[in-house]
Every structure is written in structure tokens, then in C-alpha cells.
Image: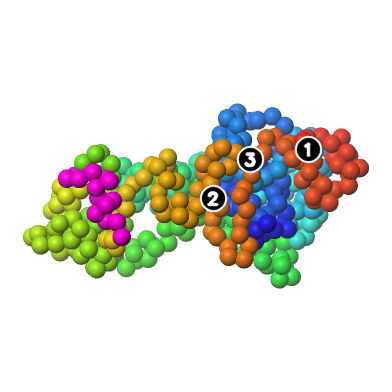
Amino acid sequence: MGVLSGIRVLEFEAIGPGPFGTMLLADMGADVIRIDRPVAHADLGPKASGPRIDITGRGRRSVTLDLKQPAAVASALALVERADVLIEGFRPGAMERLGLGPDVALARNPKLVYGRMTGWGQTGPMAERAGHDLNYIALSGVLSGIGPAGGKPTVPLNLVGDYGGGGMLLAMGVLAALLHVQRGGAGQVVDAAMVEGAAQLGAVFWGMLAAGNWKEARGSNWLDGGAPWYDSYQTADGQFMAVGAVEGRFYAELLDKLGLATADLPAQHDRAGWPRLREAFERAFASRTRADWCAVFDGSDACVAPVLGFAEAPSHAQHRARGSFVEVGGVLQPGPAPRFSATPSALPRSAPARGEHGAAALRDWGFEPDAISYLRQQGLGLQT
């Protein structure tokens, strides 16, 4: 069930952006088999604590293979032949050394979309170097714009590189390549690099820089917390309210709700007056609790919202009304998004344990019992 129903995805175990991109495909109905290592790797993240909490691993079925064994590679290639999409997140050259690189895979399956997720890309002087989200967004230029004035760059969780610029753009590239195949084109490689994806997410800022509307100084621009009407403010109970009153009519409503409509304040876009304006906002928000301000701004177009914690967000009325969060395997988590009117996404299943539901997955992929038995002999680990 789902808009990608009937699409078969073969995923090689990884962490971070590759699993997130694959989760998006699985949420939309793709049939995903993940090739896991036979034994959990010590450095592969939250799966060590159990599959239920591996939310980005949801919606798959699993088989296990030790890809360092030649027979296991033959089993992997048998799966490649039946897949529409392959997703891997190893360092450049690793799949080639295993005998599973794009040339081999596309020779076996010319319609295959071969998705590759790396930090630096498949080529270039840094291609084979290790790194993580923070390193990639640093080199992209984006990290330089995040943080307080006069302070160091702020770590924006690992959302910009791993998930926005990484997994999400990987999924978009895979879908575009699938569309190309369905229009009669050949399969191809999708080379998704987090450093480039992060730069793409920051495209608007290069435009602002070219127009002279962006200062290379953190906390001095409209969208980086420099503008007092685009920032967050502490309330009387130590919580925060986020303000994004960019447009003039919304800004006017903000002043009205704060009780500052008739105050002697600098104009909204008077940069020299921003410090005084910020002080007025700080005093106003500090005078009441977050709950009080939520009541004040309820139904308002002042572009003000409470800053909710991860544990708080699912219980907000907006999320409850839309069913934005779901419970899977006893774990509350974001539901599939976006939404489709004709082909809605089904509730995902929890991430599989190693080899879980692998036998059923092979049957669904058209393998006969004798072939499944042979693959077991070649090292394929399966559970029913």
C-alpha cells in the first residue's frame, strides 16, 4: 500500500542519511530488503539498543550476509537482479572492492537505480576521508551562518547534512531516476553528497549574499536571529516562544499582542534600533509564562509559536488533529509524510531484527523454495 507500492529496494546496512532516505521510500510503500551484517557492528548507532527505537530503520525486512565471503556476494547479486533500487552508504570504492559496484550491478540489472550516499561525494580530493554531518555542513558554508552574534557556530542537530541535504535529497534523486526508467530510460547511479546537499539547502543565502542582503557575521541578518522579530524569547517560567513576524501586517499584530503597539519603538527594519527593539521584546515575553503567551497568541497571525520539546510536540492540538505522530511497536514517532490523497501511506512496521522476515521477503520477490534454500547455503541469514 502506498504511492511506491511494487517498487523493490535493496538497502545495505548503514547509519544516518542512507537509512533516513530509505525510510522515506518505505513509508511511501516501497518493498525494502535490508542486507545486514550477521553481527551488529559496535559503531552502527541505535540499533545496538534494539530495533524498536531504530525509527529510521522502520518499514524493512532483513536478510544477513557477510559480504567479505565470495559466496555471499553471489547471493547479494541475486537480490540486485530483482531490485528496482539499490542504496548504499559506504566510502567510495567499498562496493567496487566487494564486487558489488555500479558497473557489475547495472550489467546484471540495466534498469537499476543505484543510490550512493556519502559525505564528500564519490570523487574529489576528500572523497575517501571520514566525516560526519558537522564536517560536511562546515565545508558547505552553511554552518558559518548558524549561531549567535559574536559566538561560535551552533550545532543544528544533524538535520542539515545527514537528513535534509543527505537522505532527503538521496530519496528525491532516486525517485527522479526511477521516473526516468519508467519513461523508458536506462538505470543509472545517483551520487548524493551531504556537502553538496547542505549547500543546496542554503541556496537562498547565496542569492541574498549576491544582492548585498546577507552579512557574513552570525546573528546580524533577518533569518539568523539577528532581527528581533525572527528569534526566540524566554518566558517567565523559563520556557521559550518563537517569533517569525517578517511581514509588516504580521509584525503589527505581534506588537499589538505584546502590548507594544503604542510604545515608542524603532521601526521594524531600522537595524540601528534592533538592540532596543529586542530589549522591549525580551521584557514583554519575560512578563508571562509560555502557557499565558500561547493563550494570548491563540488564533493570531502574529507568527508566534511555543518552542516544544520532543516529548511535548506530539500532544499539541495541531498534531493530534492531523495524526502527525504514530505509535509503532510501542514507540511514539513521526508518521509518514508527505500525505497522498489517492495512495495513502500505511502505518509502518518497526525496524527488523537481523534477518527478521527475510524468508517472507524473498518469497515476495519471486524466489522459489529451492532458490531460497540455495541462498541459505551461500550464507544468506533468514528468519521467517
Closer to us: 165 or 356: 356
Q: For the residues labelled 1 and 3, say whether their Cβ atoms are less than 8 Å apart.
A: no
> Separation of disc 1 and disc 3 at Cα?
15 Å
The circle on residue 384 is 1
Instruction: Report the number of discs.
Output: 3
Structural crowding at the residue carrying mark 3, measured as other residues with C-alpha within 10 Å and reported as few (<14), some (14–19) or many (≥20): many
SS at badge 1: loop
Q: For the residues labelled 3 and 2, say whether their Cβ atoms are less than 8 Å apart.
A: no
Residue 298 counted in the magenta span:
yes
Residue 141 appears anywhere in the view: no
- Residue 299 in the image, given as x and y percentages of width and height: 31, 60
Residue 186 counted in the magenta span:
no
- From which residue to which does the magenta span run? 286-299
Looking at the rendered structure, the kind of residue marked 2 is: Gly
Q: Earlier in the sequence, mark 3 or mark 2?
A: 2
Q: Residue at x 56, y 34 (%)?
A: 46
> Separation of disc 2 and disc 1 at Cα?
27 Å
Residue 326 appears anywhere in the view: yes
Structural crowding at the residue carrying mark 2, measured as other residues with C-alpha within 10 Å and reported as few (<14), some (14–19) or many (≥20): some
- Residue 172 in the image, given as x and y percentages of width and height: 58, 59
- Residue 60 in the image, given as x and y percentages of width and height: 67, 45
Looking at the rendered structure, the kind of residue marked 1 is: Thr
The circle on residue 335 is 2
For the N terminus, the quadrant is bottom right
Relative to 221, say whether 162 is above or below: above
